[in-house]
Amino acid sequence: MKKILAILMALVIVATCGVAMAEDAPKIGITIYQFADNFMTLYREELVRYLTEDCGVPAENITVMDGKNDQAEQTNQIDAFIADNVDVMIINLVQSSSAASVIQKADAAGIPVVFINREPTAEDMALNGNFCYVGADARQSGTMQGNIVLATENKGDFNGNGQVDYVMIMGDPENVDAQYRTEFSVKALTDAGLTVNKLFEQRGDWDQTKGQELAATALTQFGNDVDVIFCNNDAMALGAYQAIVDAGRVVGEDIYLLGVDALAECVEMVNNGQMTGTVLNDHNGQSHTAADAALKAAKGETLEKYYWVDYVMVTK
């Protein structure tokens, strides 16, 4: 009976991941824009775990590199993967604008590419080659942030002046996720008929320390006029929360704070009332989908251009 169960489990893994036997497993090159990023750490660890434990790819067949937030460094890593003749690459770009050159290089080498987390432009996605993008539609996450504010009793207008006075702490503005989260969080408010007033908008590059510094600057400059602080990710929201505390403000009582990613610490803060809400950026669903797409491509199958994983709103 145990032997039968083991065979059935193996068949389930094959059906899910597309890897028949360890000796037939592909060589996979993975490069992440920056290991220090909170969300991408969760993503990277789950991606490798899923590939090795659930899909049966030997650990020695997987090379994971830290792009160190340096596009030149990451380009060298991609060139090394191509020289090593990997079967497929999974790439979290440092700069989305580098997608075209990566696509062309990979296509010339006959190596499929799965882009993750940072979406190439529509123009780049229209290029020739066997590649895809796996991610979540950042417009959805921005809209959900706005909807969380709309669901509050005062619809984001703490100071009662008839408008939502907000601070926006962006990620890297070259990144389409930062662009869409910034645009659509506010658009959700205006689409609902609210008047908004942007007090402050600066790039925090997804970094907690920068998030704290920018929020502190905004709160010093605008004081109690600030109704809402939108952050493009949870790391910056964690920093903004500390600035809110230091300024003597209280989330939920005189200010709202929004993030994206649903890091465990931030989910706990939402439940405790220390954050107004966040949006689950499903690293499990995305990493599994990316792995499945990579294994499919490594077998010679043609990829669809996009594989989407939905965001989920997180409130108290």
Image (spheres, rainbow, N blue to C red):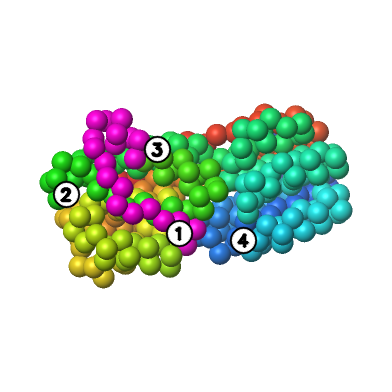
Measured in 3D between alpha carbons, the distance from the residue under mark 3 to the one under mark 2, in whole angstroms, is 21 Å
Give the residue type that dot 1 points to: Gly
Q: Could you tell me the amino acid type at mark 3?
A: Phe
Residue 106: x and y in percent read 80, 43
Q: What stretch of residues is rendered in magenta?
A: 186-207
Kindly identify which residue carries mark 3: 184
| C-alpha separation, residue under disc 2 versus residue under disc 4 | 38 Å
Residue 254 lies, in percent from the top left, at 17, 55
Q: Which residue is mark 1?
A: 204
Q: Is residue 67 visible?
A: yes
Alpha-carbon span between mark 2 and mark 1? 25 Å
Point out which mark residue 69 bears.
Answer: 4
The question of residue 145 being in magenta is answered with: no
Residue 135 shown left or right of residue 171 in the figure? right
Q: Secondary structure at mark 3?
A: helix
Height in image: 52 above or below 298? Answer: below
Residue lying farthest to the left in this orientation: 160
Q: Nearer the viewer, residue 55 or 180?
A: 180
- In-front residue for pair 268/252: 252
**In contact (CB < 8 Å): disc 2 and disc 4:** no
Cβ–Cβ under 8 Å for marks 2 and 1: no
Residue 316 visible: no
- Which secondary structure, mark 1? loop
